[in-house]
Image: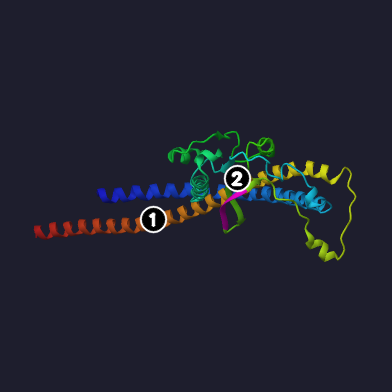
Amino acid sequence: MPANIREIKGRIKAVGNIKRITKTMQLIASARFQQMQKRATDAQAYTLKVAEVVGEVASTMNPAEVDLPLISPPAKKAGKELLLVLTSNRGLCGAYNGNVMRTALKHIRETGREGLDLEVVGKKAVNIFKFTRVPVDTVHAHIGDTPSYDDVAALAQTYMDAFVDGRYDAVRVCYMAFRSMSKQEAVLQTLLPLEPPQADETEQKKAGVATNYEFSPSPQDLLGELLPITVKSSLFQMFNEAVVSEQIARMVAMKAATDAAGKMGKSLKRQFNRARQAAITTELSEIIAGAAALE
């Protein structure tokens, strides 16, 4: 077998192996996406319901009377904010990490590195910040690919404590938000301070009558209990959306790689057939020429 044919045959085998690997990774990402999407949908329902309850409680209060540290920025400016960046631990997910890091680096340049504390989740963020020579203050390596509510709630509690103590003017999170199957976008969202809660008047308008509630304990005390839950559930939802977006990006990237490997395999097979046909034609020409020389 000529060397050229052996080389093409080896490449066909290598491309076939790559196609099987990328196809397997696509199926794994698809299964994980369905699992994480269900988890994110369930968590989103809880987060929205908590926000609805907070709005109902806030509707009974005079906005001027609301004095809660999680809503009001510190009276004395700290001159520093905290930025949490969420990326993946593994690659092969297209532009997922690149888009998140581009948004984070833009904010760091605008704010100034000395004006913020930088915390990251995911090995890719650590590597990119190291490459760009941006120092990272804290790496949350204990939070894995499937973040638990307890880990995220503990992290949110440390942020609330630091914000209430006046160490930060704001706490922001840079992550990939899940909008739909066809749209995910890197966003920079403010976790603290919370926006002042407002009641959803849509349902009241549909009903045509407002409902009056009597609260015990007072609405101020209820908001004091509900707002920390809102912060924890909101941060957990951000983590869930980031994981869902990662699986979609990996699924799309692996499908594109599988399709590209399939096209390359077909092209190599055509080259192999041409090379084999050329070798057969050459051998036949040599045999015919040899037989003619003997006559």
Task: Name which residue lies at 52% across and 54% down.
Answer: 252
Give residue 171's position: percent from left, percent from top. Answer: 62, 43
What residue sits right under mark 2 in the picture? 173
**Image quadrant in which you'd find residue 67:** top right
| Residue 111 appearing in the image | yes
Range shown magenta: 183-189
Front: mark 2 or 1 = 2
The correct choice, above or below, for 167 with respect to 233 in the image is above
Assess disc 1: are there few (<14), some (14-19) or many (≥20) residues with their C-alpha within 10 Å of its C-alpha: some
In the rendered image, residue 108, in percent from the top left (x then y), is placed at: 51, 44
Residue occupying the point 87% across, 60% down: 210
Q: How many marks?
A: 2
Asked whether residue 122 is in view, the answer is no
Residue at position x 65%, y 50% in the image = 37
Q: Pointer 1: what residue?
A: 264
> What's the residue type where badge 2 is placed?
Val
Residue type, label 1: Met
Residue drawn 70% across and 44% down? Answer: 231
Vertical comparison of 65 with 155: above or below: below
Q: Is residue 212 left or right of residue 58?
A: right
Say if the magenta span includes residue 160: no
SS for dot 1: helix
Nearest the eye: 273 or 62: 62
Chosen colour scheme: rainbow
x, y percentage for residue 276?
28, 56
Structural crowding at the residue carrying mark 2, measured as other residues with C-alpha within 10 Å and reported as few (<14), some (14–19) or many (≥20): many
From the top left corner, tell me how far across and down residue 272 is, in percent.
Answer: 32, 55
Farthest-out residue, front: 76
First-in-chain label (2 vs 1): 2
